[in-house]
Image: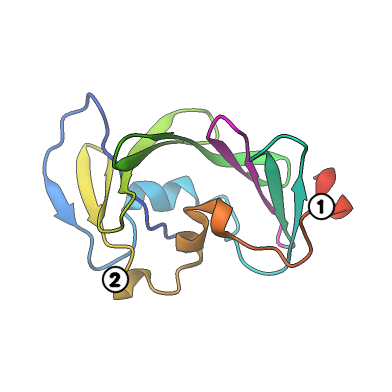
């Protein structure tokens, strides 16, 4: 399965061997490997919102479930199994997302400027520059889910079908 993500980040505390321009694809191989076990966020979906602000779940008909909590934590599940997660922290001009695999190992740290522009993904000892507006990223279903808050489910916002998934 082709898993492409338009994301960016800096891997704090790790040496970066070089900067690569991933203009030939939307995401670096480390992120493609991270999401290989997830179905893409496409197709019919239902939403469930809890009483707490920013605490919600999106459930896709292909089995993918995206969950968010007020702390900035997001989980991507395929059925009951977590396939990826991230915690997002905001700074003055950027958001920093720490992506982890199903076992909780940090895979990448992504830095995205709030005002748009290129993102940086640091993983596997390299920094990768990603342009979310590039032709390579156009139409990529994972690009939409980089900000799960912007995804819309027509069967929401309080679906019983998604409440228990």
Q: Quadrant of residue 161?
A: bottom right
**What residue is drawn where x is 42% and y is 60%?**
4
Name of the residue lying farthest toward the right: 160
Tell me the mark number nearer the camera, choosing from 2 and 1.
Answer: 1
Q: Residues within 10 Å of mark 2 (few under 14, many from 20)?
A: some
Magenta residues span 62-76
Name of the residue lying farthest toward the top: 13
Q: Quadrant of residue 62?
A: bottom right
Residue 110: in sight, yes or no? Answer: no
Q: Quadrant of residue 44?
A: bottom right
Identify the residue under disc 2. Answer: 134
Q: Is residue 51 above or below residue 63?
A: above
Q: Is residue 34 above or below residue 152?
A: above
Residue 91: x, y in percent?
33, 34
Q: Residues within 10 Å of mark 1 (few under 14, many from 20)?
A: some
* Label ID, residue 158: 1
- In depth, the one of 145 and 115 nearer the eye is 115
């Amino acid at each position: 399965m082709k898993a492409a993500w338009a994301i960016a980040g800096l891997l704090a505390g790790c040496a970066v061997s070089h900067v690569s321009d991933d203009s030939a694809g939307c995401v670096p191989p480390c992120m493609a490997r991270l999401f290989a076990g997830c179905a893409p966020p496409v197709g019919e979906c239902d939403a469930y919102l809890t009483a707490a602000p920013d605490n919600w779940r999106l459930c896709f008909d292909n089995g993918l479930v995206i969950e968010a909590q007020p702390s900035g934590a997001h989980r991507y599940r395929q059925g009951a199994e977590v396939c990826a997660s991230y915690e997002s922290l905001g700074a003055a001009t950027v958001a920093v997302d720490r992506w982890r695999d199903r076992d909780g190992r940090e895979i990448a740290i992504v830095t995205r400027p709030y005002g748009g522009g290129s993102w940086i993904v640091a993983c596997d000892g390299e920094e990768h520059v990603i342009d979310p507006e590039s032709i390579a990223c156009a139409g990529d279903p994972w690009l939409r889910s980089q900000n799960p808050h912007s995804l819309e489910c027509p069967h929401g916002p309080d679906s019983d079908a998604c409440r228990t998934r």
